[in-house]
Amino acid sequence: MTPTVEGWTGLGRAGEPPADESERPDPWSGAAERVGDYLRAMGVIDAFELELLGARVRHRLLARMASAEVEDPLEAAIEEVNGLLDEWLDGELGMAGERHTLLAARAAVLSGAAPGWTARFAGVAGESIAGAIRAATAQPTPEPAMLDMPPSPILLCCYGVRQRIAARLRRLVVGRAPTSPHP
């Protein structure tokens, strides 16, 4: 009997290795539903688009698993969805790896500000929507830079307490006014 994905431990039933490679479950079967949920959360709601994108993610996941060991197929599949989106945005907008622009474009499409992006992302629509994405993209903030500000001391509530207490004690003992400007 072939083990189910839910009962799969990586070794087979009762800790024994599988008899042959055909007993290993398809890693996609355990991740497919969650990847579909993730794509729907991104805004992809058309069943045909979900099917097309799911097939592309499955292909990328299996290629990734063939070249390197993957600890969690679901996590790797979600990473492939994000990689697929980033590659599509890079190709659609011709950004050539500009990180800030990529993040701003991703925010624009995921917010729904660029209508029709899911069909283009899935490869169903033929017209480029780069103009709509650029129009919906907010300008990214500039790179963090050092400010030229002089340091200012931090005066804590207990700063100079010892001097103030000593001055008051001298005043009580000696009976004269304190020499410090602090009361």
Image (cartoon, rainbow, N blue to C red):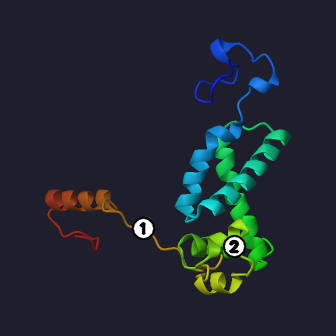
Residue 117 horizontal side relative to residue 97, left or right? left
Identify residue for label 1.
Answer: 154
Residue 145 horizontal side relative to residue 41, left or right? right
Where disc 2 sits, the SS reads: helix
Q: Is residue 77 above or below residue 158?
A: above
Answer with the quarter of the image where residue 110 lies: bottom right
- Residue 79 circle label: none
Q: x%, y% of residue 24? A: 74, 27
Residue 80 horizontal side relative to residue 40, left or right? right
Residue type at mark 1 is: Ile
Residue at (63%, 74%) from the top-left corner? 117
Identify residue for label 2.
Answer: 120
Tell me if I can see residue 115 in this picture.
yes
Q: Is residue 2 above or below residue 129?
A: above
Farthest residue toward the right? 67
Q: x%, y% of residue 64? A: 80, 45
Residue at (71%, 70%) from the top-left corner? 124
In front of the other: 41 or 20: 20
Q: Is residue 174 above or below residue 78?
A: below
In front of the other: 163 or 13: 13
Answer with the quarter of the image where residue 148 lies: bottom right
Q: x%, y% of residue 151? A: 52, 74
Residue type at mark 2 is: Arg
Q: Nearer the viewer, mark 2 or mark 1?
A: 2
Residue at (14%, 59%) from the top-left corner? 172
* Mark 1 closeness class: few <14, some 14–19, many ≥20 residues within 10 Å: few
